[in-house]
Amino acid sequence: MAKKLHDTPNLDQLESGPWPSFVTGIKRLAKDKDIMVDLLGHLEHSYQTRKGYWKGGTVGVFGYGGGIIPRFTEIKDENEQPVFKDAAEFHTLRVMPPAGMHYNTDILRKFCDIWEKHGSGLIAFHGQSGDIMFQGCSTENVQKAFDEINELGFDLGGAGPAVRTSMSCVGAARCEQSCFDEGKGLRKIVNAFLDDMHRPALPYKFKFKFSGCPNDCMNSIQRSDMAIIGTWRDNIQTDEALAKKWFAKHGLNELVNDVVGMCPTRAIQLKEIKAVSKDTAVSSVAVNDTQALEINNKDCVRCMHCINVMTGALAPGQDRGATILVGGKRTLKIGDLMGTVVVPFMKLETDEDYEQLLDLAKRIVDFFAENALEHERTGEMIERIGLVNFLEGIELEIDPSMVANPRTNPYVRMDGWDEEVARVKAKQAAA
Amino acid sequence: MSQPQMRKPIECGVPDHMQYLHPTLRKNYGNWKYHDRPRPGVLHHVSKSGDEVWTVRAGTQRQMDVYTIRKLCDIADKFAEGHVRFTIRSNIEFMVADEKKVAPLIAELEKNGFPVGGTGNSVSMIAHTQGFLHCDIPGTDASGVVKSLMDELYEEFKNEQMPNRVRLSTSCCEINCGGQADLAIVIQHTKPPKINHDLVANVCERPAVVARCPVAAIRPALVNGKPTLEVDEKKCVCCGACFPPCPPMQINDPEHSKLAIWVGGKNSNARLKPQFMKMVAAGLPNHPPRWPEVAEVVKRILRTYKEDARPWERMADWIDRIGWPRFFEKTGLTFTKYLIDDWRGSRSNLNASTHIRF
């Protein structure tokens, strides 16, 4: 039995309503745990005064320089003693999840048992970087909890100026749009950077994210320094039986308005079957006895819209891999940045392909480590030095797929133009 | 003196996910053909092998006590061969290879208070951050905002009645850990930091704090003979970037830290390229425990989108079609001078054409 609950009139109001209540969950833990009794008091104080009262500090586990988020209370009485003393230390362990966030109940129950013993009993699945967050631990128990979690085959994630925990979508495990083995890619890359994760020494954070197709369910384009987004080079695949089934259910209006009309590059046309182009870059599929969709794959930008609408009837091609973009992040400090293309297509099929991906990741992180300013993300670094300097640094050739359009101003020194034309032409001739 | 023997970490990294996959997913890894949605909250995937799997998705509170997790495990053991996965939005998914298990699984989840939904054209669970519960720099709470809003949006989670999927996020400071979304709620501070000059020299690495400011408004100063920092309040944009590296520069304020609403962000490449979200409302009070003023604006925008957008239009696609003047007209929100961008590159956010909808 724990001590008596504090009055929490604000939090109590979050127990009503149909959505699952975190307050009810914390109160259940507070029956046995003084730390949760005081956490409720601490949180209620924030609700009443509309301010936060945690400060950071230095707490870690032996051998690592990051992965624990230390929290010490700032609510003190007149003698500088914590008002909510049993929650005066409320640290979080960031633990990396399996790719795709798959679990069996055996491992989840073991997590619960460990965290009931050493921590507060509150676990978040998952934080915004993908970590399992074991929330609420005393300084003394952090090492004990980590040791037991680590023995289960789980490791701490990143914090501070380090390679961070990564995420990949459900992907190949359950999604027909998957264009590479996202989980394999994630493990291959992240597990090669554990030193940069566990011993923070980069200019600032560095995030990898893995999405299996351009729907980008992991939000990688704006939430990662290096986004690996699945795509394909060859023609969209089609399945006539599924296309006819879709058409029978949805009809001509939806086909025209929701599929043909919404293609962003007008790559799809509705045609009489006999008029469909025989060009090798054309995919086509009959939707009824007389009409077919004709897709010009040279115009298609692999946006996924038509495939999302007619899943199975249309599908990504067979020559699959990923587009790689660098530099996504949110506002601070120079403003929002999307990741931009540095590799239009990298084949991701064989072990050698994944080695090549890792090799590129190493070149990018090395360049970042050596060239970024303190507290500067990759996107800001590229903004400062220019994409071309970055590409030269990581030894990648330029490609017109890297730009939305060529430059719109003349402010550039161009006396090397002729040599550059000759170099690019020679390179193209050699390819 | 001898040191106590410390256990060295096993630097094992990301565990192999294959050991945790549901058997049908493991067997058909990389071999899926298509999927459909038999009802809201349920996905039905068909493999090229002919195998089928039904996924039942349910909402959680993300911040879960061990009793809640064990209850979900009991349900997984009873119906789903002891396997689950989580989505990026903290929904839990149960996979079953037998269609007959779907209805009893849904009944069991709902009986235990876990709403089934969040698939297809629904409003899925809100991506959220730590807030008052655990963050060291929060302007507001996260779990409470999400709980309040999901109570209001409960039916939209359980049904697929929106034009396309709707992704929401909340963030307790302008760092925006919640991320880009169709609709995002983000703290917007409106007053410069209040500086405790007695503490700055001891707590803050002053050159690093000066460098952190996006508008160069911070400079070294002496106050009462102590080295400290001062802020040019005319330049300050109240972003709060100085607060994390220098806690004596308190940016959070119960009255003046307001909430802003942003719309039209998306990460997907489908149709329009990925879009940043745009600020459309601000000045909403930080009003725990249920933030009714925020909920009102959120519901108003979602209601307008639901009524007006065409099938498959995300929030950004819809606004791209109807234009910003009509967005403000239809939602009844007020367009003010503060919504006209003046940050670097801002002219690309102006209308450089005569494309105007009358």
Image (cartoon, coloured by chain):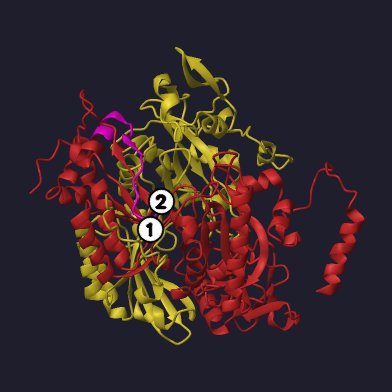
Chain colours: A red, B yellow
Residue occupying the point 74% across, 53% down: A388
Q: Residues within 10 Å of mark 2 (few under 14, many from 20)?
A: many
Q: Is residue B311 visible?
A: no
Q: Of all residues shown, which one is farthest toward the bottom?
A: B49
Q: Quadrant of residue A48?
A: top left
Residue corresponding to mark 1: A156
Compared to residue A88, the image places residue A290 above or below, namely below
Magenta highlight range: A45-67
If you read the primary sequence from the N terminus, does the residue marked by circle 2 or circle 1 appear first?
2
- B346 in relation to B70, above or below: above
- Report helix, strand or loop for mark 2: loop
Q: Chain of mark 1?
A: A
Q: Nearer the viewer, residue B144 or A226?
A: A226
Q: Amino acid at mark 1?
A: Leu
Where disc 1 sits, the SS reads loop
Residue drawn at 57 percent across, 59 percent down:
A227
Compared to residue B144, the image places residue B207 above or below, namely above
Q: Amino acid at mark 2?
A: Gly
Question: In the image, residue A292 lies at what x, y percent?
Answer: 65, 78
Residue pointed to by mark 2: A66
The rendered magenta stretch, by its main secondary structure, is classed as loop
Q: Are marks 2 and 1 in contact (CB under 8 Å)?
A: yes
